[in-house]
């Protein structure tokens, strides 16, 4: 929002579900004017969160995903070029506890070095990869992922199966692994999807100024990004967009059509290319 609008207008819009969230419901209940604006929305951040563990701080950093070469189809992008990466990094609160519990030394067991991530500072919890075009005023969220959560879960499973944990060549008491997973990482496992999505949308909308945002469905991601083998978790591309009021659209970003009209036309003839779309333009009218 860049101005005040009646709450009734929000209730009648695709964004009505947001008013039911605890932070918004509490503010709306005490909003005497019956209108919502930027100042009131700013107060909603972190308001009404009963469980302190569900209110975490993260560091938002930017990175790039370079697929601007002849082998771009191998990089799981919808077109050749460079993607913006919105990275969600842990704060010292997590990283200090992580080192105390697991004592990894110089190893980084929950990092995929082929993916975006902080190489020299705070560890990276999750990241979102975004393609965008300032000329068309559109953005496409290509991917959201947490290597840290996935690798930590795999490590935990191996430890439970084998009955022993080894990092940096040293055995770690199993109780330390359990404590890290249950006491330190668990809140982040719950939050990371919505947290990285919120961070990506803030960068796209508030910092860059793009107000029409697309996101892949499970089907469009596999087809457009040339994914072979295991597909990403469906929930990331089926449930997560709905939480942020994306709606299904029988359309794709114009910049994809312009980049390779023949390919887009051929894919569309085989089956409809539906995507999720969040159109914020009407809220400015």
Image (cartoon, grey):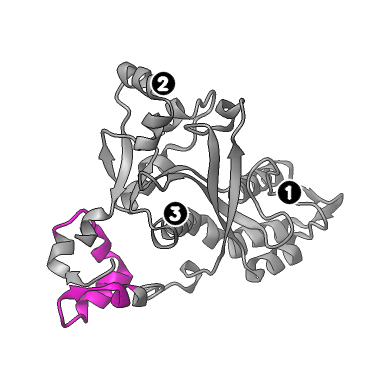
Residue 245 placement, left or right of 79: left
Give the structural element (helix, strand or loop) at label 3: helix
Mark number for residue 137? none
Question: How crowded is the residue under tag 2: few (<14 C-alpha within 10 Å), some, or many (20+)?
Answer: few
Please report the residue visible at 44 percent of the width from the left and 32 percent of the height from the top.
221
Give the structural element (helix, strand or loop) at label 1: loop
Marks 3 and 2 close (CB-CB < 8 Å):
no
Mark 3 to mark 2: distance in Å? 29 Å
Residue identified by numbered label 1: 109
Instruction: Name the N-terminal-most of marks 3 and 2.
Output: 3
Which of the pair 68/59 is nearer the observer?
68
Pinpoint residue 143: horizontal percent, then vertical percent: 49, 42
Pinpoint residue 119: horizontal percent, then vertical percent: 72, 54
Residue identified by numbered label 3: 197
Instruction: Name the N-terminal-most of marks 3 and 1.
Output: 1
Q: Which residues are magenta?
A: 12-41
């Amino acid at each position: 929002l860049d101005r005040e609008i009646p709450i009734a207008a929000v209730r009648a819009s695709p964004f009505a579900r947001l008013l039911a969230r605890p932070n918004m419901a509490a503010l709306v209940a005490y909003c005497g004017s019956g209108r919502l604006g930027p100042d009131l929305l700013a107060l909603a951040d972190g308001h009404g969160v009963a469980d302190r563990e569900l209110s975490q701080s993260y560091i938002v950093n930017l990175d790039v995903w370079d697929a601007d070469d002849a082998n771009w189809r191998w990089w799981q992008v919808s077109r050749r070029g460079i993607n913006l990466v919105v990275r969600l990094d842990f704060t010292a609160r997590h990283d200090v506890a992580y080192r105390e519990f697991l004592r990894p030394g110089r190893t980084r067991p929950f990092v995929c070095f082929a993916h975006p991530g902080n190489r020299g500072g705070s560890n990276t919890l999750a990241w979102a990869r975004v393609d965008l075009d300032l000329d068309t005023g559109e953005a496409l969220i290509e991917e959201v992922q947490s290597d840290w959560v996935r690798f930590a879960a795999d490590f935990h499973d191996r430890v439970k199966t084998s009955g022993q944990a080894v990092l940096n060549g040293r055995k770690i008491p199993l109780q330390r692994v359990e404590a890290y997973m249950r006491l330190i990482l668990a809140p982040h496992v719950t939050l990371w999807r919505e947290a990285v999505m919120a961070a990506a949308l803030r960068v796209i909308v508030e910092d860059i100024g793009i107000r029409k945002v697309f996101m892949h469905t499970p089907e469009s991601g596999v087809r457009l990004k040339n994914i072979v083998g295991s597909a990403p978790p469906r929930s990331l591309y089926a449930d997560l967009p709905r939480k942020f009021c994306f709606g299904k659209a029988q359309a794709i970003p114009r910049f994809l059509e312009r980049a390779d009209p023949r390919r887009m036309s051929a894919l569309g003839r085989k089956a409809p290319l539906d995507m999720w779309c969040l159109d914020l333009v009407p809220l400015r009218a």
